[in-house]
Amino acid sequence: MPRPRETGRREIKRRQTRLALITAALRLADERGADRVTTDEISAAAGVSPRTFFNYFATKEDALVGDPMEGSGELSLPPGPLLEALLTALAPAFEQIQKDRDLWLLRMRVIGANPHLLPLLIAAAASAEQRLAQDIAVRDSLPDGHPYPPVAASVANAAVRVAVCRWAEDRDSRPLIDHVREAFTILTTI
Amino acid sequence: MPRPRETGRREIKRRQTRLALITAALRLADERGADRVTTDEISAAAGVSPRTFFNYFATKEDALVGDPMEGSGELSLPPGPLLEALLTALAPAFEQIQKDRDLWLLRMRVIGANPHLLPLLIAAAASAEQRLAQDIAVRDSLPDGHPYPPVAASVANAAVRVAVCRWAEDRDSRPLIDHVREAFTILTTI
DNA sequence: AACAACTTTGCAGTTTCTGCAAGTTTGGTT
DNA sequence: AACCAAACTTGCAGAAACTGCAAAGTTGTT
């Protein structure tokens, strides 16, 4: 019985290694600045060989930026009003981010201190946005080229971005999903 | 009288060199694939030393992606309805792109053939989008954190992206700005 | 002509990143 | 348990990317 793609020591170990590389990269970059850290040092700090680093990330920057929506997996949008559908479909991703709050704060600090990383984060978010637009088009069975899906995805992306920023500065640590909900309801009032 | 930042052999030569590097990079990448071209080859084809390449671009990819809005300079948004203001403010950029049509088609082909470049193009567009959001906020004197500017800029970006795609496939070669106008008017009907 | 500002270039050196060919671990089968 | 295949790690060798610096060469100004 071939395990789908979830559990199994293999997958667990992979996640661990990946996380170890990411946190090592971020911690070192936070201490000395992103370009004063080498992939060799990151690998050493994560306890793997230098070559292994590139089994996980194509570039050093990728380890620093990470995949913003790695928690979302294959998202299937339920029917109903779009914003509510997005909330439920993206909830797992937001929960994952919530769990990794400290890591995210660290990451945002590093990106803030190393502006050349920002475009990469934006690019990652944009990729997620495009996938989202595709999913919206499928859900509402809209023809290719219809402007609604990309526009909606674009707006949702902007709202999430704002929500994440507020969440990051929120001393009360209200869960991220609350901030997203708030941003979405603001959207409906425009 | 210190020339502002426009004419002068210096600036002209810089533009020429930059353009030569970009076209050389794109042509070579188009022939053999982006990762089968070295910065040394690009420099040689452009007639400059290998070291000079990095005076113009931080990375090889930057030469391939270019700056989507290099023609816009410091844009000042006139008053009035936003979409019309955007049209007039961005017109110079669109004209520049129109002039470089062949270069842009080549670039889009290269990016299509080398998907790892797409995120970088998206990131460049996103940077432009953020600058635009800032300009919108200033124009309408909206407080920092107001959702309108980023959302509007985001939507405008999406519209321009669609317009550029149609323009690229337009056999009649209708000017880019017409396509943008069209996309914008579609927006108003949503 | 002379001077300052900017640009190109070469050189030396480090870091990034890749391909390949071992080894090692894991998951599943008989 | 013994076995096998797929996945993962690792080391090595090497190409290519990238940086800092200082010496030229250009351009703009007085």
Image (cartoon, coloured by chain):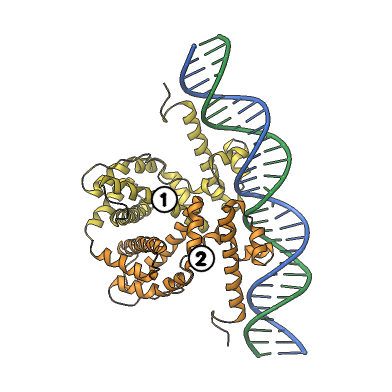
Chain colours: A yellow, B orange, C blue, D green
To which chain does the residue with label 1 belong? Answer: A
- Residue A158 position within the rendered picture, expressed as x and y whole percent measured from the top left: 34, 56
- Residue A147 position within the rendered picture, expressed as x and y whole percent measured from the top left: 30, 57
The quadrant of the picture occupied by the N terminus of chain B is bottom right
The residues tagged by marks 1 and 2 sit, at their Cα atoms, a distance apart of: 25 Å
The residue singled out by tag 1 in the image is A127
The residue singled out by tag 2 in the image is B103
Q: Are marks 1 and 2 on the same chain?
A: no
The answer to whether residue A112 is seen in the rendering is no
The answer to whether residue B54 is seen in the rendering is yes
- Residue A42 position within the rendered picture, expressed as x and y whole percent measured from the top left: 59, 43
Relative to B94, is D15 above or below? above
Pick the front one: B136 or B20: B20
Q: Quadrant of residue D21?
A: bottom right
Label 1 SS:
helix
Q: From the image, state whether disc 1 or disc 2 is nearer to you.
A: 2
Q: Do the residues labelled 1 and 2 touch (CB within 8 Å)?
A: no
- Mark linked to residue A144: none
Mark 2, other Cα within 10 Å: few <14 / some 14–19 / many ≥20: some
Amino acid type, label 1: Ser
To which chain does the residue with label 2 belong? Answer: B
Amino acid type, label 2: Leu
Mark 1, other Cα within 10 Å: few <14 / some 14–19 / many ≥20: some
- Residue A9 position within the rendered picture, expressed as x and y whole percent measured from the top left: 48, 26
Relative to B90, is B26 above or below? above
Residue at 59% in and 82% down: B8
Q: Quadrant of residue A58?
A: top right
Residue at 43% in and 73% down: B95
The quadrant of the picture occupied by the C terminus of chain B is bottom left
Label 2 SS:
helix
Q: Quadrant of residue B142?
A: bottom left
